[in-house]
Amino acid sequence: MATDTASVAKQAEISRHNGNVAFKKERLGAAIDAYTEAITLCPDVAVYWSNRALCYFKRKDWERVEQDCRKVIELDGSSVKARYMLGLALSEREDFAGGIKELEKCY
């Protein structure tokens, strides 16, 4: 059983790496797909969610940024990156009070 878990975690890391490579090449769709695969394999790893949120952020898909950042914060309440992106996404969606609240938590 432990071997299966290690194998799944290793595959998730490979998917994250593939996502990082695609992201660096600005292939956001491919990066999103790779991070989604990593999330499917290991949904409790906050960095997979934050990496995908960054892709959505670059696409200005504010609703998905919000969803992924809220998941990151659920998994890792100390993530300044997630709170920052969430604050900006909320502001872009004209939830200025919510955006300011999240941005203030960055400091």
Image (cartoon, grey):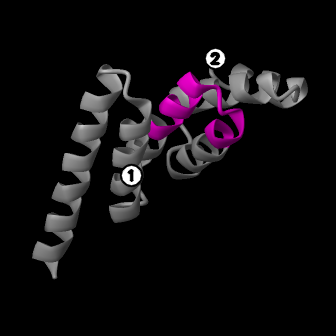
How many marks are shown on the rendered structure? 2
| Residue 90 point in image, percent of width and height | 77, 30
Q: What type of secondary structure mainly makes up the magenta span?
A: helix
Split into 4 quadrants, where in the image is the C terminus? top right
Kindly report which numbered mark, 1 or 2, lies closer to the viewer in this rendering. Answer: 1
Residue at the spot of label 2: 107
Q: Magenta span has 60? A: yes
Residue at the spot of label 1: 45
| Residue 92 point in image, percent of width and height | 78, 23
Q: Is residue 49 left or right of residue 70?
A: left
The residue carrying pointer 2 sits among few (fewer than 14), some (14 to 19) or many (20 or more) residues within 10 Å by Cα, namely: few
| Residue at point 83%, 31% (across, down) | 98
Query: Does the residue at mark 1 contact the one at mark 2 (Cβ under 8 Å)?
Result: no
The residue carrying pointer 1 sits among few (fewer than 14), some (14 to 19) or many (20 or more) residues within 10 Å by Cα, namely: some
| Residue at point 35%, 61% (across, down) | 42
Tell me the amino acid under the disc marked 1.
Answer: Val
Residue 79 in sight = no
| Residue 26 point in image, percent of width and height | 38, 21
Foreground of the two, 15 or 45: 15
Foreground of the two, 46 or 18: 18
| Residue at point 47%, 45% (across, down) | 49
Residue 39, image quadrant = bottom left
Comes first in the chain, label 1 or label 2: 1
Asked if 84 appears above or below 9 in the picture, the reply is above
